[in-house]
Image: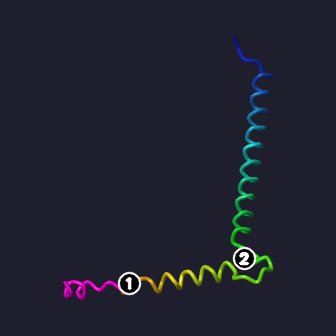
Amino acid sequence: MLIGSGYCQCLLWFKSISWAYAWSRYQTNTANTMLETIVSIQPKDSGGTGGETREAVVYRLAGEMLVKLPNDYVPHEVYGSL
């Protein structure tokens, strides 16, 4: 039994619609990802509370951690102290 041309045309139409839908979803997802990235890297408003900004908090905490680090590891000095 041969497949009629109407069936083939229907399949081609469905394929074109599926491709168009997939392309539309891809474009939408790409745009959403780009916008989310742009918004996520924008400086955050402190909300007017007068407290530290997020950047100031990170800088302060990094400084506190840096002070707690041990001295640089120098292999021949460590070996000599053993």
Q: How is the image coloured?
A: rainbow
- Label 1 – label 2 distance at C-alpha: 33 Å
The x, y position of residue 56, in whole percent, is: 65, 83
The x, y position of residue 34, in whole percent, is: 71, 63
Q: Tell me what residue is drawn at x 56 percent, y 81 percent.
A: 61
Magenta residue span? 72-82
Provide the secondary structure element on which disc 2 rests: loop
Mark 1 nearby-residue class (10 Å; few <14, some 14–19, many ≥20) = few
Mark sitting earlier along the chain (1/2): 2
Magenta stretch: includes residue 81: yes
Q: Which residue is mark 2?
A: 43
In the rendered image, which quarter contains the C terminus? bottom left
Q: Which residue is mark 1?
A: 70
The x, y position of residue 81, in whole percent, is: 21, 87
Residues at circles 1 and 2 in contact by the CB criterion of under 8 Å: no
Q: Specify the quadrant of the image occupied by residue 20.
A: top right
